């Protein structure tokens, strides 16, 4: 065990990376079930590694791992500190919970001869997301971002069996995602031009005397826009609703809970570690770009969600609004605001994971998630609908759920910054969430059931169990938020301390 | 393309040299310009030329689809296993120093194996992409153009 421990940071990425080509080999013989089991096992290994890494960085110090033994800043450094260990835990945790759910869902939604390659793409996507998070090298972030994005396009396109629009959704995301990644890499290129380094820690030091440099400003703009596209910041969110709606359920669960969060993390990393709020252009961006966009996102996302007739699309728009909350926390750039963002990265993963998983169960039984088809569904699928409503309560931010914890800190943050009208706006947009969750309650609980050709049964236990694990976590971390707030405070203080 | 005699003869003559050049770029990559990616593309170009001139069905006999499905992950496996070899031999991930008793020789060996992995995957992927387009059922008949 002592032999493995120092290598944990790289194993976190290298294990799913090597698992992907191994998974392809299951095509010889067509062992579909084995491919699923293998992916499940790898996910759990990743999760255990993430737990080990997080506990080590929280109790001990940051970990630095030099790939190929080239010392940083010359070689690629994997740097684990509380914030990215926390994000690693979210990614691998969601994956570990979602995969038991996956088998039946994938069986139903994806063509049989594509299952093994689907799991391979999934492993590559996992590799990419974990890699983006763990690496301390700016260019390496781009490389892993591309690995995760390319596999994501494939994963979304596999939804084609349910609806052929999955193809255009994947293509749209491909175009916009590529533009985002290109902007990001242009930004990194410009930074490399002026500083001659790609290591983020080293970059932070070398940027200090360059705060008036125009190239640095341009690089900053490119990186913020590029990441804004990837994380679906309000006017750049157009790819997201279709991608989430037409992707297979497992993919929607995994993407909604992890991929945009990883982009938020990268943005945080650049805003607070590489640049830092001590630069004028960073604070100006917070105040005049991110803050207004975040508020518009909160309302535009929620308002559009109210008028949706497809439940997956409804929650996809709600994700746009939720990303608005995260960016609002960032733009406040004070301790409670930043804590709210970090808490919401975790909390939103739990809520949206649960919600989309519940919709996955509906999809499994009904083959559609349009609100019209869900009439009176609470009587035939009480556990699924119950989970959907409880997840919805968490999304609204009812006390006792995780949603409340993040909104509470967000409101504290706005008050500390002296923006009390924004605190009212946060409450206002939460009320909009009440409306769209109520729409589902009304359809599923109050309306009379429609006559169906066959009797709809409750979803199978292998799908309900992971769903309810997520629902219970929504309440557990809503009532006992000590651990998450402790991590969030720790991170927020490091970020703001480094800049001050 | 049965009637294009010149094309067939010339490409038959060229294909071995394209492959040879691919191998040169592959294994000379650590001294001069080149490397696994470029070599993989050149190597795949030979197969694509063959498929263009002699037909997709003929090319599938040379490299069956099954072989491609094996070759694409094989390259990545070679890459990743070299990385793990570094760990097992007491170094870091992708640490070439420990691959041989002499660190310089280890570096040489490491990059050679890694680039071989890259070359195999890139060549197989290039042929697969070509085949994905070439092998599609024709929407329009040849006579209907």
Image: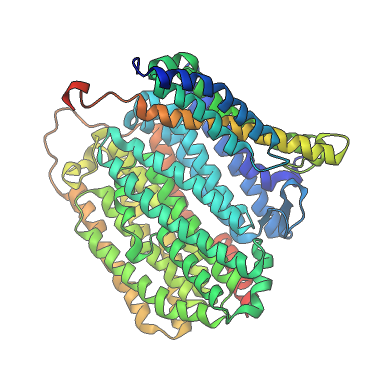
How far across and how far down the image is residue A126, in percent?
Answer: 52, 43
- The furthest residue to the right: B101
Task: Work out whether residue A256 can be spotted.
Answer: yes
B26 and A145: which one is in front? B26
Q: Residue at x 76, y 42 (%)?
A: B95
How far across and how far down the image is residue A328, in percent?
Answer: 42, 72
**Which quadrant does the N terminus of chain A fall into?**
top right
Residue A462 in the figure: left or right of residue A336: left
**Which quadrant does the C terminus of chain A fall into?**
bottom right
How far across and how far down the image is residue A280, in percent?
Answer: 53, 83
Is the image coloured rainbow, by chain, by secondary structure, or in one colour? rainbow
Residue B98 in the figure: left or right of residue A45: right
Quarter-of-image position of residue A83: bottom right
Number of marks in the image?
0
B47 and A220: which one is in front? B47
Residue A72 against residue A379 in the figure, above or below: below
- The furthest residue to the front: B6
Q: Residue at x 59, y 56 (%)?
A: A139
- The furthest residue to the bottom: A418
């Amino acid at each position: 065990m002592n032999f493995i421990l120092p290598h944990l940071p790289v194993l976190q990425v290298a294990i799913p990376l090597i698992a992907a080509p191994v998974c392809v080999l299951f095509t010889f013989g067509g062992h579909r079930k084995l491919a699923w089991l293998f992916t499940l096992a790898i996910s759990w290994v990743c999760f255990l590694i993430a737990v080990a890494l997080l506990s080590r960085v929280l109790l001990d110090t940051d970990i630095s791992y030099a790939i190929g033994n080239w010392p940083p800043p010359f070689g690629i450094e994997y740097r684990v500190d509380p914030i990215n260990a926390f994000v690693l835990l979210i990614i691998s945790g969601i994956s570990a919970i979602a995969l038991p759910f996956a088998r039946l869902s994938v069986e139903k939604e994806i063509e049989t001869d594509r299952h093994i390659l689907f799991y391979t793409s999934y492993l590559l996507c996992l590799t990419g997301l974990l890699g983006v998070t763990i690496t301390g090298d700016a260019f390496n972030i781009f490389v892993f971002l591309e690995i995760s994005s390319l596999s994501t396009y494939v994963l979304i396109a596999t939804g084609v069996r349910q609806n052929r629009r999955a193809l255009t959704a994947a293509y749209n995301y491909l175009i916009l995602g590529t533009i985002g990644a290109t902007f990001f890499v242009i930004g990194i290129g410009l930074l490399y031009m002026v500083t001659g380094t790609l290591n983020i820690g080293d970059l932070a030091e070398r940027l200090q005397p360059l705060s008036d440099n125009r190239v640095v400003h341009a690089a900053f703009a490119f990186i913020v826009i590029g990441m804004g596209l990837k994380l679906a910041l309000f006017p750049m969110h157009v790819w997201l609703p279709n991608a989430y709606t037409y992707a297979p359920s497992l993919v929607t669960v995994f993407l909604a809970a992890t991929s945009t969060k990883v982009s938020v993390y990268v943005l945080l990393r650049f805003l607070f570690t590489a640049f830092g709020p001590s630069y004028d252009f960073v604070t100006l961006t917070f105040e005049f770009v991110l803050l207004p966009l975040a508020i518009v996102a909160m309302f535009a996302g929620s308002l559009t969600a109210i008028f949706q007739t497809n439940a997956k699309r409804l929650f996809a728009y709600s994700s746009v609004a939720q990303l608005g909350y995260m960016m609002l926390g960032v733009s406040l750039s004070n301790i409670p605001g930043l804590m709210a963002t970090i808490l919401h990265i975790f909390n939103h993963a739990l809520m949206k994971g649960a919600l989309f998983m519940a919709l996955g169960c509906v999809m499994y039984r009904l083959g559609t998630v349009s609100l019209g088809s869900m009439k009176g569904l609470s009587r035939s699928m009480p556990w699924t609908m119950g989970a959907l409503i409880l997840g919805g309560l968490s999304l609204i931010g009812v006390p006792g759920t995780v949603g409340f914890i993040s909104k509470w800190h967000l409101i504290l943050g706005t008050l500390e910054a002296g923006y009390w009208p924004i605190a009212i706006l946060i409450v206002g947009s939460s009320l909009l969430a009440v409306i769209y969750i109520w729409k589902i309650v009304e359809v599923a609980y109050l309306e009379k059931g429609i006559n169906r050709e066959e009797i709809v049964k409750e979803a199978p236990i292998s799908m309900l169990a992971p769903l309810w694990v997520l629902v219970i976590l929504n309440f557990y971390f809503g009532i006992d938020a000590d651990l998450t707030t402790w991590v969030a405070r720790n991170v927020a203080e490091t970020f703001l301390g480094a800049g001050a | 393309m049965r009637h294009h005699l010149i094309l067939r003869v010339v490409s038959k003559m060229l294909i071995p040299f394209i492959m040879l050049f691919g191998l040169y770029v592959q294994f000379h990559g650590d001294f001069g310009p080149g490397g696994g990616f470029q070599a993989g593309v050149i190597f795949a170009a030979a197969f694509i030329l063959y498929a263009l001139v002699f037909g997709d069905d003929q090319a599938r006999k040379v490299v069956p689809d099954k072989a491609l499905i094996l070759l694409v992950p094989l390259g990545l496996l070679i890459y990743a296993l070299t990385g793990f070899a570094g760990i097992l031999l007491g170094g870091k991930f992708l640490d070439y120093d420990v691959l041989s008793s002499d660190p310089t020789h280890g570096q040489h060996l490491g990059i050679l194996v890694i680039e071989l992995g890259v070359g195999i995957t890139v060549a197989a992927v290039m042929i697969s992409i070509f085949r994905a387009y070439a092998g599609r059922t024709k929407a329009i008949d040849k006579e209907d153009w």
